[in-house]
Amino acid sequence: MIEGQPFQLFSLSHICVLLLLLLAIALLYIFRNDLRLGRSNLVCRYGLVVLLLMTEIAYQLWHLGVGTWTVTEVLPLQLCSVSLLLSCVMLVSRSYRLFEVTYFWGIGGAGQAMLTPELFYPFPHFRFFHFFLAHGAIILACLHMVWVEGYRPTFRSIGKALLWLNALLLVALLVNQGTGGNYLFAAHKPENPSLIDYLGPYPWYLLSLEGVAFLLFYVLFLPFRGKQKAMAPSSELT
């Protein structure tokens, strides 16, 4: 584990960040129609892509700079790290198939991370800003695809998201075995308090997480239940 000063859950700085995220979400919704216009759409999509990539690059460079970069902890194999990269490709390609997975992974995973961060550095440390900027931008990227691009997940999308999540879990288990890491928290529970604490001991909480993931994904699907999926241009349905 990377040592540092403790992060306080629901401290003043944490609550302020959550309020700022809610403000950004509200602004995205209010200006959703304006952001559908050509230039505004490009600025919003590619602005999010630049922000996401900069947070990931800065994170990797920071670890290299302080001498803590290791394959045990820094590979982009956590759910939110993969969601970040998928969000970038989704925003550029406007791929509906990527949206089907990234919507559930991104909002479900990053939302949980925002509420119960696996973070060891408080405000105003670099890692504090990196963590909340990256996870907040993932959520905004997914909501952009819903409110601006007009994409809608279907019930089948839940199955696809779960299928690919289990495929990622298998990769994480193999990488954890070879590196001694804890990617996807598949080796042990997070150090900081989280929902996983209530799901039983290792390895049974991995099975519990399957049910939690389905319930969470279903809740994220509920706003679209009974609504027709908006279609992207045929050239972009990839």
Image (tube, grey):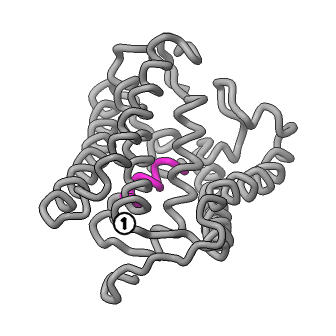
Residue under the image location 58 percent in, 72 percent down? 227
- Residue 101 image position (x, y, % from top left): 54, 66
Q: Work out whether 11 lies above or below 222.
A: above
Q: Quadrant of the C terminus?
A: bottom left
- Quadrant in which residue 162 is drawn: bottom right
Task: Measuring from the top left, give residue 17's x and y in whole percent.
Answer: 42, 24
For mark 1, give the secondary structure. helix
Left or right of residue 173: residue 48: left
In the rendered structure, the answer to whether residue 44 lies left or right of residue 191 reads: left
For disc 1, the marked residue is 90
Part of the protein shown in magenta: 79-87
Q: Quadrant of residue 187?
A: top right
> Residue shown at 32%/63% (left/top)?
91
**Residue at horizontal 63 percent and vertical 61 percent from the top:** 221
Q: Residue at x 33, y 36 (%)?
A: 59
What's the magenta bit mostly, secondary-structure-wise? helix
Left/right placement of residue 11 relative to residue 48 reads right
Pick the residue in front: 13 or 30. Answer: 30
Is-magenta flag for residue 177? no
Please state which of residues 71 and 218 is positioned toward the viewer in this rendering.
Answer: 218
Q: Provide residue 116's location: percent of width, then percent of height.
A: 60, 29
The magenta stretch spans residue 82: yes
- Residue 47 lies left or right of residue 194; in this view the side is left
- Examine the rendered structure and indicate whether residue 235 appears above or below residue 144: below
Q: Is residue 189 above or below residue 237?
A: above
> Which residue is more in the foreground, 10 or 146?
146
Identify which amino acid the numbered label 1 is placed on: Met
